[in-house]
Image: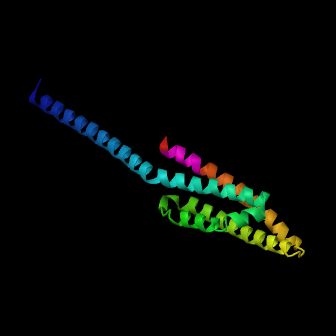
Amino acid sequence: MTAAQILGSVVIAAIVTGAIKLVRDWRKRVHAEKVARRERLGPKFRELIGICQNMQGVATRLENDPAQEIAVEPDAIRQFRTRLDAIVEPDLAEMHKQVDDVLTEMTQWWGAATQVVGMTAQGQDVNPKIRNRIDDLAESVGGNLERIKDELKAQLKELEG
């Protein structure tokens, strides 16, 4: 073997070793970034899912027995808003907005239901448009909460996978 061949072999070995080290370091960095992302976002995903589940409970009770729900949980909407506003994460901005939109609809539903309960308690007739609006909001809130919760669970599973 000539000196040039030996030198060429050494250079090739150094290049291959360097490439292997670069790939290994890249894989470690990607793994560390995934772990950090999972640790940062996992609890926030779970909190959003929890908010959706709690909202579903209130929605069910609001649909089945609005007078009782309004009397028992007057601060429920405010508590959801507080919990939702505590989640500040750019990576979850779209999901946060979707939950916020449904919470806004739920607030409107709550207000309309409160109005109907009050009118009924006073023996007043309730405008059918208000009842139709309540039905529309109930359907929208229920369907959107289920869809959002399923999407959040799928994203969390992907994050943890």
Quarter assignment of residue 103: bottom right
Note whether residue 137 is visible: no
Location of residue 155 with respect to 93 vertically, above or below: above
Residue 99 % position (x, y): 61, 61
Q: Residue at x 84, y 67 (%)?
A: 132
Residue 88 % position (x, y): 48, 64
**Camera-nearest residue between 72 and 48:** 72
Residue 76 % position (x, y): 64, 64
Q: Residue at x 67, y 64 (%)?
A: 73
Note whether residue 142 is visible: yes
Q: Residue at x 56, y 61 (%)?
A: 96
* Residue at the outermost left position: 3
On screen, residue 19 versus residue 139, left or right, reads left
Q: Residue at x 60, y 63 (%)?
A: 80
**Camera-nearest residue between 133 and 50:** 50
Please report the bounds of the magenta region as a residue range.
152-159
On screen, residue 30 versus residue 130, left or right, reads left
Q: Is residue 64 within the magenta segment?
A: no
State the colouring used for the structure image: rainbow
